[in-house]
Image (tube, rainbow, N blue to C red):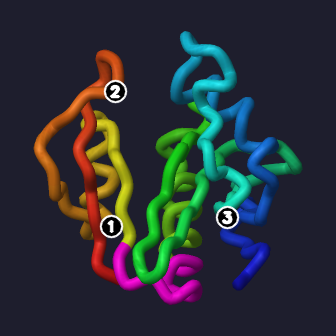
Amino acid sequence: MTNTSHSGSVLIQSITPEQTYQLRHRVLWPDKPIDYVKVENDSDGYHFGAFREDKLIAVISLFVHEQTARFRKFATDPDYQHQGVGTKLLNHVITEARGLGATSLWCDARLDAADFYRRFDMEAVSEVFYKGPIPYARFSLAL
């Protein structure tokens, strides 16, 4: 497994689950307590951060069970969105998932991000469901 990769002025590297919490909270669920963004099995996952000039600007967590990989809590600082940072981070996670032997990758995606996931050839494989007021669908990719 690769721990770091450079892509332009963005450095992607492995981080601890704890390093993901502030950005997860601020971007995904700012109206909830910080514990809301913690995942029960965070310690079992692989966590990656995108850094620009030593500032953590995006996070994603990857969980692999047998040949199925799932990413969760994908968050990019709003000041750095639409600059290719999330694309670089998700491409890194796809490569990592393959390297860990996964043959499929999935996530529960907010519908407002569906077009982003479709650019990676991910397809909706569920009906719309809600987490609180936010509509989601499960998206999947064969690796």
Callout 2 crowding tier (Cα within 10 Å): few <14, some 14–19, many ≥20: few
| Cα separation between marks 2 and 1 | 24 Å
The residue where tag 1 is placed is 120
| Residue bounds of the magenta highlight | 95-104
- At x 74%, y 60%, the residue is 9
For the N terminus, the image quarter is bottom right
Q: Is residue 81 magenta?
A: no
Task: Say which amino acid is labelled 1.
Answer: Phe
Mark positioned earlier in the residue sequence (2 or 1): 1
Left or right, 14 with reference to 61: right
Of discs 3 and 1, which sits in the foreground? 3
Task: Say which amino acid is labelled 3.
Answer: Tyr
Quadrant hosting residue 79: top right
Which residue of the protein is positioned furthest toward the top in this rendering?
A: 31
Residue 34 position within the rendered picture, expressed as x and y whole percent measured from the top left: 68, 22
The residue where tag 2 is placed is 131
Viewer-side residue, 52 vs 100:
100
- At x 79%, y 57%, the residue is 15
Of discs 2 and 1, which sits in the foreground? 2
Callout 3 crowding tier (Cα within 10 Å): few <14, some 14–19, many ≥20: many
The residue where tag 3 is placed is 46
| Cα separation between marks 2 and 3 | 24 Å
| Cα separation between marks 3 and 1 | 20 Å
Q: Secondary structure at mark 2?
A: strand
Task: Say which amino acid is labelled 2.
Answer: Lys
